[in-house]
Amino acid sequence: MRCAFLVAWREFVENVKTKGFWLGIFLFPAILVFAGSVPLILSKKAVPTRHFVLVDFDGKYAPAIRAELARQRDAELGDALKTHARRAPYTEPFASFVRPASTNGTVWHGGELDLVRWKADAGTNWLAVPGFVPPRPGLLERPLPPGLENASAPAELEARLRPWLRGETLLPAGDGIPATKLFAAVVIPTGYGPGATNAIDFWCENQADTGLRDLVQRRLGEEFRHSEYRRLGLDPAVVARIDALRAPIVSLDPRKAAGEERVGLSDLLRQWAPSFFVYLLWVAIFAVSQMLLNSVIEEKSNRIIEVLLSSVTPGELMMGKLAGVAAVGAVMLAAWIGSLVAVALFQVSHFAGGAAPDSPVATLPADVIALVRTTWLLPAFAFYFIAGFLLYAGVFLTIGSLCNTLKEAQNFMGPIMLVLMVPLFLMPFIPRDPNGPIATFLSWIPWYTPFVMMNRITAHPPARDVVGTAVLLAGFTALVLWGCGRIFRMAILRTGQPPRLVEMFRWIRGR
């Protein structure tokens, strides 16, 4: 055992010293931060302001579209103000904003911002908050280029607008706006309306950016419906109030104690948190097993393995490598989970400043702690990581002993990867029916037991499934390691072409 321990320590130290290990440690939290922040930042910073022209030949629908644009701009400013209020060094705590019914000289209610008044002047829709910089608008209507105001028909106007739409001519600078390309033109023809056969012409090179097009279509669709309501003698306000009615539903869990049956965020976490741990388990097992495979192939190709086997037996070498790389995986997982907790707590503390004490954001840390304390989530994760790692790492270690190069190992990796990919495909469906026939059946297949049972662990699976699959997994893992050990002992010093499948079965049988 002492020799196996020395091999394990050497394997651990050698892997921990590599750049790849530290890259994996720091890459995971970086991915978490970027995955949550980069799309939001890109949506706000990377997409430029879209400059467009709006021409309504009848003048019936342009005001409605402009009103919707103003409402969208108000929402952009409100979000930016909330973010600014959280970051600004005010003495009073931030409270949630309440949008007044009228912006004309009224107040945004929000703690330290109560005394700040909304400017309702044309073109100055922002709050005079110290240090607040209004975000640039996502959509900005521009006047028609000079000389195009006298176009008498949509066809004439559109033909003359083409140089601007193609970027051959830029919109002139003005009001602090530099000369820029015209993004789109919205042309509403004469006679357009409900039941009309003509349509709005939406001119734009970038049809993938549908923000403006969707806004126009959504707002005019509402106008058409309101017009039809009025034609039928219905009050649109009454219709809107009726349409806003919802059937109240309270989700209750029959397994909870009397008086505590209401389903909250903690219950949803209990249902979906295992899926995250399953993905983490999958990544960890694959990454660490791949690390073990590369290590064996490198030592075998460099003839280092012969030096090692002069001091230890093949069994001790295999046990030491498994234990050492498992320790590497445990350290990596601990760092990942710790970074996840740190990022989550930071996000919660950042966004919970104006949240009510009983809001989901404010209670999230307590809900997570309760989830960990009242379930077998972490002990189960530890057990299934060890069992799953030993199961798959034994196979990867054996593949490494059979091959002299990574290219040869790819031929064996194909079937293993197919087996490993199945749990990923099934993970979104297991939480929906964690104790159903499919989940139960897959739980009793040892190759999938770590992933499926990890996903079922907080759904109160039957005791026979928990205990039975754990015993079956432990026994199957021991059997696989025994067979892999026999192959490892015979193949570790072998050179040349990898053995055939029939020959490996003979090694397992001791022939």
Image (cartoon, rainbow, N blue to C red):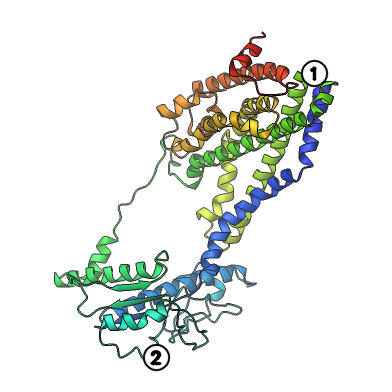
User: Residue 79: x percent and y percent?
Assistant: 50, 69
Q: Is residue 333 above or below residue 54?
A: above
- Choose top left, top right, bottom left or bottom right for residue 120: bottom left
Residue found 63% across the figure and 73% down from its top: 90
Residue 313: assigned label: 1
Is any part of residue 257 visible from this angle?
no
Labelled disc at residue 15: none
Q: Earlier in the sequence, mark 2 or mark 1?
A: 2
Which quarter shows the C terminus?
top right
Q: Position of residue 309 (x, y in %)?
A: 81, 22
Could you classify mark 1 by the number of other residues whose Cα lies within 10 Å: few (under 14), some (14-19), or many (20 or more)? some
Question: In this view of the protein, which residue sits in the foreground, 201 or 332?
Answer: 201
Label 2 secondary element:
loop
| Position in image of residue 188 (x %, y %) | 28, 77
Residue 68 at what x, y percent from top left? 36, 74
Amino acid type indicated by mark 2: Pro
Q: CA distance from mark 2 to mark 1?
A: 88 Å
Q: Quadrant of residue 261?
A: top left
The answer to which of 319 and 281 lies nearer the viewer is 319
Q: Which mark is residue 146?
A: 2
SS for dot 1: loop
Task: From the viewer's side, name the closer residue of 432 and 149.
Answer: 149
**Amino acid type shown at disc 1:** Thr
